[in-house]
Image (tube, grey):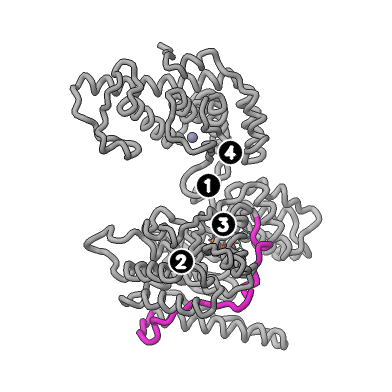
Amino acid sequence: MNTKTPLQSAYSTFVEQVNHAQVQRVSLGRDRIDYTLKPEFGHHRYTTRPVGSTDEVVSTLKRQGISVTIAPEPLPPASIAGLIISSGLLVGSLALAAKVSRAGAGTAVGMGKSKARTYGKSKTGVTFADVAGVDEAKQELQEVVDFLANGDKYRQLGAKLPKGVLLVGPPGTGKTLLAKAVAGEAGVPFLSMAGSEFVEMFVGVGASRVRDLFSRAKKQAPCIVFIDELDAVGKTRGGNPVGGNDEREQTLNQLLTEMDGFDGTNGVIVIAATNRPETLDPALRRPGRFDRQVLVDRPDKSGRLEILQVHGRAVALGEDVNLAEIAAQTAGFAGADLANLVNEAALMAARHNRQAVLMADFMEAIERVIAGLEKRSRVLTPVERQTVAYHEVGHALVGSLMPGSNRVTKISIVPRGLGALGYTLQMPESDRFLMLEDELRGQLATLLGGRAAEEVVFGKVSTGASDDIQKATDLAERAVTQYGMSASLGPVAFAKASAQFLDGGSDRRTTSPGVATEIDREVKQLLDDARNLALEILRLNRGLLESATQTLLETEVLDGERLKTLLAQAQAPAELQRWLAGGYCVA
Ligand code: ADP
Ligand code: MG
Ligand code: ZN
């Protein structure tokens, strides 16, 4: 082990390092965790303060075969209160030690018994008031609360209760907290278990744990079964015929069987959480299983303010503390990061022997937490933020002038879950089965509008538009090869019929080399023209591009009336109508 003094790290950083299997050994203390990274990650020693329960992390470590030791507690002060508190803690840490060592020894006795923690009536003690900044998710879950609390009302009407709700979102956004809050609000028992706990080393143990969990749930209904880290059990089956994980598949099959086995009238609702929805077996999403998906995303500025208010209640805030200002400086933070921030600031104040936490403490804490987050590129630099803002406004501005039903209804620069830096939401006003040629062309220009804005403003482009370019190219290719929208090639289908249902890359019919060249030329022409039109629109509306971007940088999200009013000022260039009619040519 490295002998240098340990570095401080944010708890969320630690969790991330554990999830990326970078951690070599861990010592769990009462309110601190000391750990060392594996040699290939620097072999450095770190110390961090846990936020909330550490069960999840411990089980991940367990799965990775990493040794977890329990740090000895310091002797308690000889007061009655001190004795009571510390004996409680002792029991807690002994229990934890027992749990960890049992997993290490792998005794098979009693292994099939579910280790699910049960909380009695509303014992989770968590309500919706504790979860902030995720209003849409709360709204969707309100219905589940109502089902659980007033099941009879629904049963009388013959309504089917939802069976499974999948909470999807990046780590630390409050998925576990939300599930507990649903139980707390409905006043029903909460049985929780992490997906990784199902998957043990003995074949069959996971499946029997699932059975056990559900049989207990049925006895306690109405209740909530919460499966955290669903991806640990729910990965697509049969991907790997050689090294397939039989145990995991059996567990997953058992879970599917259990979910099919109750009919939704007995009041057991299964809530699961994952931050890797794309890896889940499609069977889990079928009707009657996890057919509802609720997105729990990183909060925007006003959401962050609400979360800071929730966690700020627990500490003594100095008079100079401006939570709105802190919210403005913490773009990209998830709820757990904000909870951690408040805690770090309080520690900072304690170090300075202050009576209350001051703004200066928060500022220092922000720097520390950001340093941790930046490594995972979740916090944008000011220049990146600006680039993303121009890009998103570019999409929206170009889109606002295009025909058809795909109106841009929301733009955001809150860094989102899975890879996207910002996003633009286009809402079809109704289901569409046909796209007219002018709409298709409009869609192309809108897709390329983001990159065009970067070009207009900075004179150069970033790598952030690759997805847009991919989508635009696919669409242009289909226009030419499937929809017969090219004048020179005419109404000839160049894609094989069987490939038409596949979005994107199509299987082409055998064509002469000349025709293939012409297809490529036509696709490129469509895209070049769309790009030029987008550039034209943005140059003409340069002032609006600037002002809308400033507004977006200020508020992080633009939607509804505000966005509509802004975009209504956009002017159409003379070329627009010709382009839409298909006769546009810049050459
Ligand atoms: P997830 O399950 O999405 O990874 P958790 O629910 O475990 O996140 O969040 C960890 C902790 O971070 C919570 O116990 C809470 O203290 C804080 N937290 C996260 N999201 C929120 C939120 N939306 N509102 C308030 N606190 C939050
Ligand atoms: Mg969680
Ligand atoms: Zn884009």
Under mark 1, the amino acid is: Arg
Taking 334 as reference, is 345 left or right? right
Res 124 → quadrant: bottom right
Q: Is mark 3 within 8 Å of ligand 1?
A: yes
Estimate the spatial distance between the alpha carbons at disc 1 and disc 2, rounded to whole Å.
30 Å
Under mark 2, the amino acid is: Thr
Which segment did they paint magenta?
104-132
Tell whether label 2 touches label 3 (CB within 8 Å).
Answer: no
Q: Which residue is mark 4?
A: 410
Q: Residue furthest right?
A: 319
N-terminal of the pair, mark 1 or mark 3, is 3
N-terminal of the pair, mark 4 or mark 3, is 3
Res 84 → quadrant: bottom right
Under mark 4, the amino acid is: Lys
Q: How many marks?
A: 4
Quick check: 447 above or below 271? above
Q: Which mark is residue 36?
A: 2
Q: Which residue is mark 1?
A: 416
Res 435 → quadrant: top left
Estimate the spatial distance between the alpha carbons at disc 2 and disc 4, rounded to whole Å.
43 Å
Q: Residues within 10 Å of mark 3 (few under 14, many from 20)?
A: many
Q: Which residue is mark 3?
A: 173
Quick check: 455 above or below 376? above
Under mark 3, the amino acid is: Thr
Decide whether residue 114 is among the magenta residues. yes
Number of the front mark, 4 or 3 = 4
Tell whether label 4 touches label 1 (CB within 8 Å).
Answer: no
